[in-house]
Amino acid sequence: MRRLLPALLVVAGWALLALLVGRLPLEPDRIDLERILLSPLAAGGLGFDDLGRPVLDRVLTGARTSFLVAFGVVALSAVPGVLAGSLAGYLGGRLDAGMVLVMDVFLAFPGILLAIALAGLLGPGIDNLVLALATVGWVGYARLARAQVLSLRQREHVVAARALGSRAPRILLRHLLPLMSAPLVVEATFGIAGVVIAEAGLSFLGLGVQPPEASWGSMIRDGVRYLLVAPHLVLAPGAALFAVVLAVNLLGDALRDRLDVRSGARERRTAA
Amino acid sequence: MGEKLLEVFDLRTRIGRGPRAVRPVDGVSFHIRRGETFALLGESGCGKSMTALSLLRLLPPAGRIAGGRVELDGENLLALTERGMRSVRGNRIAMIFQEPMTSLNPVMTIGSQIGEVLELHKGLRGDALREKTVELLDAVGIPDAARRHGEYPHQLSGGMKQRVMIAIALAGEPDLLIADEPTTALDVTIQAQVLDLLRDLQKRYGMAVLLITHDLGVVAQMADRVAVMYAGQIVEQAPARRFFDTPQHPYSRRLFQALPDSSKRDRPLTVIPGSVPPLDRDFTGCRFAERCDRAWLHCRTQAPGWFDTGADAGVLCHLFDPGLVPETAPEATQEAGAASPEAPAESGSQPLLVVDGLQVHFPIQRGLFKRTVGHVKAVDGVSLDIPTRRTVALVGESGCGKTTVGKGILQLIRPTGGSVRFDGDELTRLRGERLRKRRADFQIIFQDPFSSMNPRMQVGDIIEEGMVAQRIGGDRAQRRARVEALLQQVGLRPEHAGRYPHEFSGGQRQRICIARTLAVNPKLIVCDEPTSALDVSVQAQILNLLKDLQASLGLAYLFITHDISVVAYLADRVAVMYLGRIVEEGSVDEVLEDARHPYTQALLSAVPDIEPDSGRAIIRLQGDMPSPANPPAGCHFHPRCPKARDECRRAYPPETALSPTHKARCFLLP
Amino acid sequence: MRAWLLTRLLSAAWVVLGVASLVFLLIHLVPGDPVEMMLGESAAAADRQALRETLGLERPLLAQWLGFLGGALRGDLGQSLYNQQPVTALLLEHLPATVELAAAALLVTLLVALPLGVLAALRRGSGWDTGAMGFSLLGVSIPNFWLGPLLVLLFSLWLGWLPVSGRDGIASVILPALTLGTGLAAVLSRMVRSSLLEVLGEDFIRTARAKGLAPLTVTLRHGLGNALLPVLTLLGLQLGALLGGAVVTETVFNWPGIGLLTIEAIQRRDYPVVQGCVLLIALGYVAVNLLTDLLYARADPRVRLGGGA
């Protein structure tokens, strides 16, 4: 537990910032041409960007974007995904065969590509970003839930419940979902890390959050041009992003060990 | 008898560290002579396998040998370097394991798996290596060895895999072969083949064999001398003949009494109460005292010493201390008092369940369009009656379809043909809500009590589940009261309702499963190998419970099993299945005493008898059971039948009535 | 084996059909008028009508779909709206760069992941294990679009050893390949470790030890052969992440491959080119997975020789 303390602190800080950032006296959008590209050493804080905006304020505000997108996308993909996957697995037949084909088609698009294409076509904006990532993300949960249901429904306590005359909803709720929850929770934890990277990645490509709104990804995108003269523009948001993703991954690893999920949640990265 | 080959002195093994370290082997001493078979007998968890692994120093990572000596030809193996030990393993001492399915490397050919031993210990290369490998495969009875040499393990049956394991063990021409439950995972007719082979090879190569088993019958067939292990110690040692004539230690005697057989049919089996104590603590008295009917105060306070009772024989028990006078009456005869009243013989009793021509065919689908290219005829025309208050045993080897019959009757798998009438209702036509309601009448108990309960549910909720599903048993308070009553009925305590399944032993879990079925007041229970995952002493408890419940509740059982002794003890009628069909059916006496079908005869004769040298001829079956996807034409049994004739290859034999209650399907019958 | 192969090929064909259809539908699923999206709201009515006709948007959806599939089969994916070149020609022009990058990244991955994973499993619990798994965790957590600039900063701008961007000679591929390969190496080394550990707990490893074989022989001959089978499957799946990641990495390094073309096309609202890029990458992925499945079948006798007993 002590080993996890730094990770817990980072995640708690991230969540707290996301909730409170509106009430803090930050000026992420204040342009000041006097301070353009000033480094942290020269100006204090985390320095200033190409429009003279304070990098620290922008990094803190960016936390809200990544937090909202991450939890929004995981909720919007996990709930329908688990529902679709477990129903298909439990009911079987044509429904299942159809679902498998749909999943195979979605999974045939490598990594983040489909989200890039969708976000590109839908146009910029945080809503479209969430929509694009959820459209791609549900498949992973559906596949995991279906595999779990298929292996669990063979178990003898499920057969015994059928033999006792229990109805399908009760069997799903009492016998299947509780036993599936561990791998799903682990998958969702890694999912959060994946979405954080994906959001930043799409914003980096110019497909996500639009200026002047602050996102770690778009900050890196803007900063790359000044890499030689003002590396802090890339280093600061990247470090924040890296810390959050690392912390969430650490928690995911700990959860997996704790819940003894053996290779159930595949080590998969949604993002670049 | 020859000279001593292996001597073990006061061997102690620990698993884990610190004060809670488990001591599976706690002061074990024995010796094995050249060329003899020494059996180490015991129930699961007694430390017999750990003893074997300690000899080879192959303990799991957390294990270590804490003391003692293991001398092979006078050389202490525990003092050897790891490199030195490697020249012993596979060379002077070889080992075969219980699970032939997982003990071979799936991606290497069987030839190369044997070959690497020859290369390592015999220095063979090239053609000589190949020749010797083929010779070994030949020696263990693998047909067409030259071709099979290049096959992979998954292409062989379980029995064949175990033969390959034996060939690997033989490759180093060892002085000692350790066989750890070598036939436990195999069917009884295959077990007979493998035991025969082991006996043959032992004679031919003059090896000593350390046979580790829980099966008294296997010991009787194989062993020269026997040691009984209990809770990490050897509690009795004797020459086999003497052991089977007069077992001395109270534990050994109880083991014999707990074995079901036909002579005990009218009374409950003697059980050993309780279970094996955990081995992570110190013992003050005798380890068996808690479960021993002859223990007195002294047994609980003073650990017994070893007392010799003859040449090569001795016992670890205070009863044999000449300096002590036991403070107990002669052995309690528990069985006399508790005899259950036999259900009145209603010869003309109404059949509760009538199965007629039951078929369960699973389609074999290939390709993208799931085209059906054939069927696995798991059950192919089974007819069977089960009267009320009676037990019908369905007997057969693995893969014969007996479990599928049970699930087909219960409509857990929908039959593809035939009829199942229960109390006048045609179950195969019941659908939806009507079937769901009807399910209360027929229940099922499974083999594995570990996976048959939801680990996340409390025992009380597990038992209540059926009442909730069927909306019976009144309000919640009434249902909870019923749960407590049921727990008591199956021999558990009411407060167990608040615990989780993992807190119980295997036998206790099976009791909970029984309580779960009783909650919905069934008339028929399908018992699918309910005791085959349990030790003999625990099996006896469950069999007694099932018999009691039958008498008091008037239950009918369909008892699915491969264990003939359980059938002899429990069943009223017996049906024998082979490859999806019933080949013989009759009353328990007719089938077991006067079997007429060649398969039944072979099956019965292959069961190891606990009378050593009973002189009974064993009918050896060749080969394995064919696949139900592609059964042989004619009588399914003809390729393995010692009496097969021409007509057997052409058509499936019709049913022959041998008596009003006994019938079989074989052309040889009049 | 032949039946298995046929089944596998057929199911891949279905997936390809599904993929092509989804790519076709991409434009139609997006809310709003695609023509308006492409030209902007201020475009003249005549221009809109012209584009509508060029794209065949007047025809019924089914006819458009069949037309798209038929065209794709003939290698005709339409024309770029931006510079009127055939999409197929554009794809072919950019493909070699992406293949080169992917191959180099895969090489990096294998060179790092295999030794690291095996070492971590064999020295379980030691400093080696902790170090390897620490690297793995870092590698999984670091985004390409940050790692890339960091590497550029260090090796190009400060040390001046390697070019900043572009595709010019062997040196220019090093940084992109490192960037793209790190994440995959991190995932794969972890998989190699856990797979090997699992195999080393199997019964047949005990059999091998009971033969008196030396520990190294047991690990390499009996352990690794089995442990790499599931790794192979995972590698195929992970190559997807690699191909997807190539889009980002190519953007970072201005690497003239399919990924960069995709992003440029999105920015120019050049929808036929976007469709072509997505289709090509997805098909590449399907092909790669088919290939790893075939390799798996070659390596595992249980698949190669069928069920048996």
Image: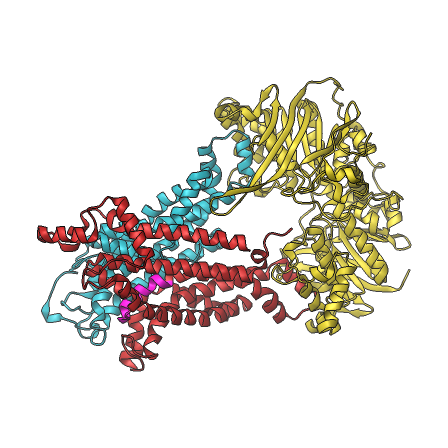
Chain colours: A cyan, B yellow, C red
In the drawing, does residue B660 fall left or right of residue A48? right
- Name the residue: 61% across, 28% down: B418
In the drawing, does residue A224 fall left or right of residue B543? left
Of residues B549 and C251, the one nearer the viewer is C251
> In the picture shown, does residue A178 fall above or below B207?
above
Q: Residue B417: image x %, image y %? A: 59, 30
Of residues C146 and B417, the one nearer the viewer is B417
In the drawing, does residue B69 fall left or right of residue A99? right
Q: Which residues are magenta?
A: C242-256
Q: Residue B537: image x %, image y %? A: 73, 40
> Picture quarter containing residue B574?
top right
In the drawing, does residue B236 fall left or right of residue C88? right
Q: Pick the quarter of the image with the N terminus of chain B.
A: bottom right
Residue B428, can we see it? yes
Q: Pick the quarter of the image with the C terminus of chain B.
A: top right
Of residues C106 and B563, the one nearer the viewer is C106
How many numbered circles does the render carry? 0
Q: Residue furthest bottom?
A: C160
> Picture quarter containing residue B508?
top right
Magenta stretch, overall SS: helix
Of residues A136 and C132, the one nearer the viewer is A136
Residue A217, can we see it? no
Q: Residue B27: image x %, image y %? A: 75, 58
Q: Residue B664: image x %, image y %? A: 76, 31
